[in-house]
Image (tube, rainbow, N blue to C red):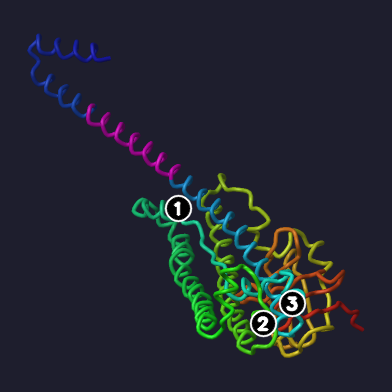
Amino acid sequence: MIKFFRKIRYNLMETGKTGKYLKYAIGEIILVVIGIMIAVQLNNKNQDLVQQKEIEAILVKIQKEIIADLHYSNKRLLKFIERDSLKNRILKRQITYNELKTGKINLLDYSSKYFLFSMKTAGYEQLMEHLDDLPGTYDNLLGLLDRHYRSGTIQRTRAKLDVYEVVQDYKKYLTENESWYGQDLYHNTISDAQINFYLKNPYFLNHITRLNEAINISIRELVSWRIVAIRIYHKINEILGENSKTIPDIARTTSLNSASESAKYVGTYVLTKGPKNTGLGSRLVVTSNRNNLFIQFNDEHEPIQLRIMHETKPWFVFNSYSASVFRFGHRGPNTISVIRGNHDQTEWIKVDEE
């Protein structure tokens, strides 16, 4: 092709056709410019595709981190349930001397240790490095990410500090007022003085109540965090389009997988055990809309959607900022066991309405 154009140029020059040569030269320049522009456009398009693939890979990374965090948060919530059962026994003064002396129950650990939740942020931080390259279609996602990784972090830090401060106050009290504290720690034993503190000292009971209040705040924030995390997972899937990922059960937005699953929990439940002053009243009405469950209490509140808390067990939380946990079938078929803040656990059973 180059030889062809060169031959034309030489012929025009040799025959003295200067005007035609100039026109030809200008045309050749235009062709070269057009060629360069096409090459630049193709290069830019390739760069855009490479950049898009890189951003999509980062989004998938964020999704993977969210799923890992959701699994970890489940462990934290389950630990909260375990603590709640022991909290009830402590406040009811049901802990025995033998349980403490034999080490079956360790109340020093229970009363002075706390768990923190730290989410993975590598994917988010990597995406922020490409902030200038993101199109306007990412604005909604960026708002969710900002709430999830920035504002949310501040709230959870405050909650963690609440727990931390409660535990530090408690340890300071033990150091200044209980002579057994240092010796029992040093010898890794439990003295009768320590046992007597747990069984009879009102400060210990008050500390457990205060510690549980702080933990409840953390759990409420963790539930709120889970809701936003799942929303982000689905928003990323929308952006990925045909490259979207299969939604695992832990990240689903519905209560259950199918309408038939939801239907078996529908009904009216009456309180059979536990305090009546928890704010739930004495009657729960569970309804469904396809594969979503809703719960109404006190006969005066609008039904609230229940969100799945566990991948396999029918344990749910409110679709809102709450530390209440509803465990269906926990005490047998057609039952609900409810954990709700600092109240004692309540148990409910389904009844046939006339």
Q: Earlier in the sequence, mark 1 or mark 2?
A: 1
Residue that badge 1 annotates? 122
Horizontally, is 14 left or right of 88 in the view? left
Residue placed at 49% from the left, 50% from the top?
59
Amino acid carrying label 3: it is Val
The stretch in magenta equals 32-54
Viewer-nearest of labels 1 and 2?
2
Using the rendered view, name the quadrant where residue 324 is placed: bottom right
Q: Give residue 338's position: percent from left, percent from top.
A: 74, 77
Q: Give residue 89's position: percent from left, percent from top.
A: 74, 80
Q: Earlier in the sequence, mark 1 or mark 3?
A: 1
State the mark number for residue 338: 3
- The residue tagged with tag 1: helix, strand or loop? helix
State the mark number for residue 218: none
Q: Give residue 183's position: percent from left, percent from top.
A: 57, 74
Residue placed at 15% from the left, 23% from the top?
25
Residue that badge 2 annotates? 198
Residue placed at 82% from the left, 83% from the top?
273
Count of marks, rendered view: 3
Q: Are the residues flagged by discs 1 and 3 in contact, CB closer than 8 Å?
A: no
Amino acid carrying label 1: it is Ala
